Image (spheres, rainbow, N blue to C red):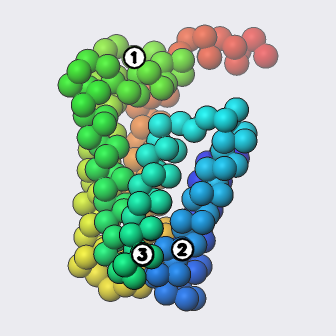
Amino acid sequence: MKALLDFIPLLAFFYVAKTQGVLAGAGAILIATVAVAAIHLMTQRGRLTKQQVVTLVLTVVFCGLTLLFHDEIYLKWKSTVINGVFAAALLISVLVGKPLLEMAMKSVFSLTKSGWNKLTLAWVGYFILMAGLQYYFAFYTSEQTWINFKSYGWLPFMLVFIVGQFVILKNHLNPEITDDKTKK
């Protein structure tokens, strides 16, 4: 349910940008992101994850600037910056010896320190790739091509990456999780 909620702002942007233009789409994604954050606050005991906070703050800033100055350049930078922030945060976490993915997923996967570093660096690479693709489509293609990529064009990249992660990580499930499944 939580993951489906996170798609609402993209759907709002896609529909409104296609029918009413990019500036109206910026308003739609802003309103939808704030609404989704409010729902997350209610369902997550008054707290947002760090990723949700970063996404909310950057969406408010970039969409707000887009609407304030009536210039889509700010909205075009939003996805590139968000992906860059996530890549930088993950890279810094590896460099300081505390991979964020280990903290987030250690109850699900059993990996060595080297394994957590490699997994986190793989995500750094993914976010860098996505930042580059977002930048390319925003600034080197037509507006409609950019809208399409921003709305759903990135999905195949994410699916390939996630499936690849599953193939690699399926043999590293935490033994407690696999023991619980065999007991049922």
SS for callout 2: helix
Between the C-alphas of marks 2 and 3, the distance is 11 Å
Q: Is residue 69 above or below residue 46?
A: below
Residue 41 picture location, percent across and down:
66, 42
Circle 3 residue: 68
Is 181 left, or right, of 128 in this rendering?
A: right
The three-letter code of the residue at mark 1 reads: Leu
* Res. 71 mark: none
Q: Earlier in the sequence, mark 1 or mark 3?
A: 3
Residue plotted at (38% across, 27% down): 100
Mark 1 near mark 3, Cβ–Cβ under 8 Å? no
* Residue at the disc numbered 1: 111
Q: Which residue is mark 2?
A: 27
Dot 3 surroundings within 10 Å: few (below 14), some, or many (20 or more)? few
Q: What is the x, y in percent for residue 73?
A: 31, 75
Q: Quadrant of the C terminus?
A: top right
What type is the residue that disc 3 sits on?
A: Leu
Q: Earlier in the sequence, mark 2 or mark 1?
A: 2
Q: Residue furthest front?
A: 68
Q: Is residue 165 left or right of residue 183?
A: left
Q: Nearer the viewer, mark 2 or mark 1?
A: 2
The residue located at (55%, 88%) in the rendering is 20
Mark 2 crowd level (few <14, some 14–19, many ≥20, 10 Å Cα): many
